[in-house]
Image (cartoon, grey):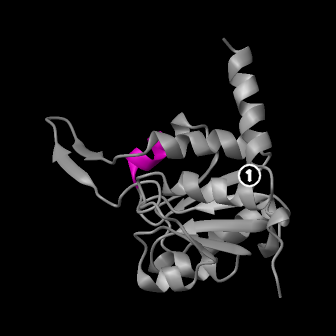
Amino acid sequence: MMKDINKIKMIISDVDGVWTDGSIYKGHSSTADIELKKFSVSDGAAVALIREAGLKLALISGRKSSATQSRASELKIKDVYNGTLNKIPPYEELKTKYALCDEEIAYVGDDLIDIPIMEKVAFPIATNNASASCKKAATYITKKNGGDGAFREAVEWILNEQGRLDSVIKSLQKKVKNQQ
């Protein structure tokens, strides 16, 4: 059965390996352990595209991380599940919260713990640096690696396939111009 990308109302994404390159920088100061991750500004801009398109966004990360929480807060992403190895319970919670079905959700992932959700959603997307099994479960594989704009590419692919990318970009540009 052919899935209809125009039914997509929500994009859910993993974080490490999608929004980041999967690297974790650890250190220690005199007061605390420090964890740093590199996030792409391009992926942050994708959040603006999602909002302008009227889509919902959630993050489900297998690894609990203050850096992930900080980036999500900065981007005003409300639905964040941080440190959730079994991603099915938060996925089901999001479906109930927003009264959505599998056919209305796209998911972006890169590794084994993402596959259970990828097998449920209408449009599973894998990053270029994803594991082979994750790529096998994907409808679309980004050309970019996680941390290098892969999430943005996935969002633009969805909007382009819906025939809305240009109008969403123009609408967003108009809003930005009016703020000057």
Lateral position of residue 62 relative to residue 37, left or right: right
Can I make out residue 72 in this image? no
Q: Which residue is mark 1?
A: 56
Q: Is residue 7 magenta?
A: no
> In the image, residue 57 lies at what x, y percent?
67, 52
Above or below residue 19? Residue 76 is: above
> In the image, residue 173 lies at what x, y percent?
70, 28
**Quick one: 71 or 139, which is closer to the camera?**
139
Magenta region: which residues?
65-72
> In the image, residue 64 lies at what x, y percent?
42, 58
Above or below residue 53? Residue 84 is: below
- Tag 1's secondary structure? strand
**Quick one: 63 or 174, which is closer to the camera?**
174
**Quick one: 154 or 79, which is closer to the camera?**
154
Q: Quadrant of the N terminus?
A: bottom right
Q: Residue at x 81, y 78 (%)?
A: 3
Q: Residue at x 52, y 63 (%)?
A: 14
Dominant secondary-structure state across the stretch colored magenta? helix
